[in-house]
Amino acid sequence: MLYEGVLRKMQTEIGNPIQYFLVFENDFLNMNQLLDKELQIDFIKFECLNCGKDKPIYRQGFCKSCFFEVPSAGDWIMKPELSTAHLDKEDRDLEYEKKVQLQPHIVYLANSSNVKVGVTRKSQVPTRWIDQGAHEAIEIIEAPNRYLAGITEVALKEYVSDKTSWQKMLTNRIEDVDLVEWRDKLQSNIPEEASKYFLSEKTETHLDFPVLQYPEKVKSLNLDKTPSYKGILKGIKGQYLIFEDSTVFNIRGSEGYYIGLDLGSSG
């Protein structure tokens, strides 16, 4: 059966294991049901997530001109400490920025390849942790805006990483750690203006990913270099599809690519 559409990050539902859905304009697929099936992915064209034009994707699913114009690609997205909506100061679109920045944000610790600190909107818990392939996570503070969460992350990344090794995450060479202990150890390093938002009662969240077989060593599928690929799906973790031949495909990293997806037979 053939499906076509522009790639956007997979939608998820918490469960044991987590359920993944690939959503196209007129169809959606429960990707868990495709485990042990042969899939063929064919690149057809680009489709910018903003303007919809067939122009090369620059970053985050946008063509180059849209990336530097749309409010959802402002620098404060990747660097929350640059948020200015709480000062009534516009970056690209103040109305949009107030809507996103002036809502509760969580600073958290997650363990996907190692212990890392991160920021997400409260409404994105636990989705953000799932997208990062974290098998355990815990909240540190709940701040009323993105700026306070951002400066807390900046302060804490002096003591703990803010990056994930996607290769290590996908080979599952990870160790369980005591995130409650880590959180309590980091408490004294939270900036004073955010310290009153510390969450002392939270416990670890554990996440179970639908993976039948982890690769020993990963090789990444790049549709620009390999526009057609066929393989047997063995797992889904983070926003990656994991195939039997150790190929991994980053769905989120390929947003804005319009593909054909052919579902083959069982493995």
Image (tube, rainbow, N blue to C red):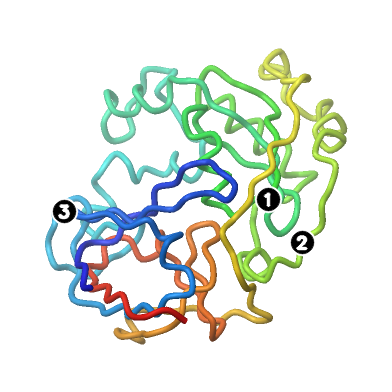
Residue 26 shows which numbered tag?
3
Q: Are marks 2 and 1 in contact (CB under 8 Å)?
A: yes
Q: Position of residue 152 (x, y in %)?
A: 66, 31
Residue under label 2: 174
Vertical order, 159 against 32 (above or below) = above
Task: From the viewer's perspective, tell me whether residue 230 is left or right of residue 236.
Answer: left
* Amino acid beneath label 2: Ile
Residue under label 1: 135
Badge 2 marks a residue whose secondary structure is loop
Q: Residue at position x 36%, y 43% from top?
A: 74
* Amino acid beneath label 3: Asn
Residue that sits furthest to the front in the current view: 266
Q: Nearer the viewer, residue 53 or 23?
A: 23
Label 3 crowd bin: few (<14), some (14–19), many (20+), radius 10 Å? few
Badge 3 marks a residue whose secondary structure is loop
Q: Residue at position x 51%, y 21% from top?
A: 104
Badge 1 marks a residue whose secondary structure is loop
Q: CA distance from mark 1 to mark 3?
A: 32 Å
Q: Residue at position x 16%, y 53% from top?
A: 26
Q: Are marks 2 and 3 in contact (CB under 8 Å)?
A: no
Q: Are marks 1 and 3 in contact (CB under 8 Å)?
A: no
* Amino acid beneath label 1: His
